[in-house]
Image: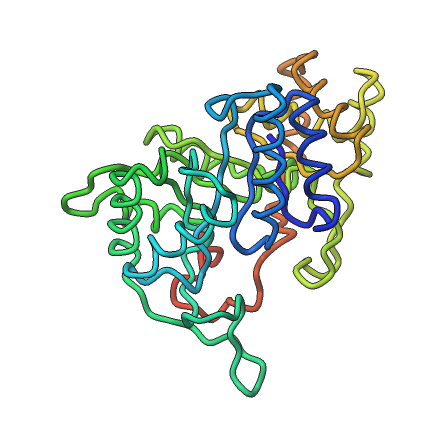
Amino acid sequence: MLQSSKVPKSRTVEVTKLAIDAGFRHIDSAYSYNNEKEVGQAIRSKIEDGTVKREDVFYTSKLWLTFLRPELVRPALEKSLTNLQLDYVDLYIIHFPIALKPGEELFPEDEHGKLIFDTVDLCATWEAMEKCKDAGLAKSIGVSNFNRRQLEMILNKPGLKYKPVCNQVECHPYLNQSKLLDFCKSKDIVLVAYGALGTQRLKRWLAPNSPVLLEDPVLCAKAKKYKRTPALIALRYLLQRGVVVLAKSYNEKRIKENMQVFEFQLTSEDMKDLDGLNRNHRFLPLQIAVDHPEYPFADEY
């Protein structure tokens, strides 16, 4: 699955086409990545040249934090669809459970540079998401960065029509999300991993003193043993735990290499060793929203 965040905008069309040619069929983007026009253009060009049909491509978009008020949900999705020039998305997810002040700014700030929060009932947001599914604008709906309490709030909502099909969260050997994964499995919710390789060095968002996951000695030893890259070992580890993995790259060689994840299997002993790497380290803690009442990462999981 290709994630298009932080792919340089000028290369988005080319990279998305490369990914489709390499065999990727699940493409993950978002309103906030500001590249849906380019991603849509690439998908349409691969449909036009006969490489894929629309139904072969699984496209995910995300509802941004400034659109969590129920009346803003459908217009936000329609805006993404207009940018993509597509009739529907396969999956539409709430990007974060944190509502920000509506408007054009992705990160509205006051004069002191602090984020301006909004107060929204996430259950009402979810009802608006359900209506998007009923209208045929999204085939499936889900969430991202929700903790167990927030998931339960949706699942226990009176009159729930559709439960979230997935919860997309940061997940890798240093933050293996075992408790959240078990909870999601028990509720038939798919856990989708972003930052599966310990994330690229996004200076603005990165937790200070973050280790470099792909230089971990245990991971590197396994890579040597299987004659694969540390990245492939990290991706395979998640896949074998029943996690859907997003891989983010704009390097042609690595895009093709990522497909090798299906060509080998880790032994249960190696899986156990990799389990031992967990240190609950979050590379992307979204510190700027830590004071929000719905900040999801204060709970244990």
Q: Quadrant of residue 253?
A: top right
Q: Is residue 301 left or right of residue 176?
A: left
**Foreground: 208 or 68?**
68
Q: Residue furthest bottom?
A: 111
Residue 11, horizontal then vertical, whole percent: 74, 44
In depth, the one of 278 and 167 nearer the eye is 167
Residue 195: % across, % down: 64, 43
Is 111 positioned to the left or the right of 253 in the image?
Answer: left
Q: Is residue 46 above or below residue 265?
A: below
Q: Residue at x 82, y 25 (%)?
A: 221
Residue 227, image x, y percentages: 83, 16
Q: Position of residue 293 (x, y in %)?
A: 39, 67
Q: Residue at coordinates 34% horizontally, 51% vertically from top-left? A: 150
Looking at the image, which is closer to me, 265 or 2?
Answer: 2
Q: Nearer the viewer, residue 267 or 111?
A: 111
Tell me the quarter of the image containing the N terminus. top right
Residue at the limit of the structure toward the front, as seen here: 48
Location of residue 185 (image quadrant): top left
Q: Is residue 293 above or below residue 185?
A: below
Residue 15, located in which quarter of the rendered image?
top right
Q: Residue at x 82, y 34 (%)?
A: 217
Question: Residue at point 49% right, 70% down?
Answer: 104
**Colouring of the image:** rainbow
Q: Answer with left or right where residue 127 lies relative to residue 223.
A: left
Position of 116 relative to 173 (above/below): below
> What is the tally of numbered marks visible in this picture?
0
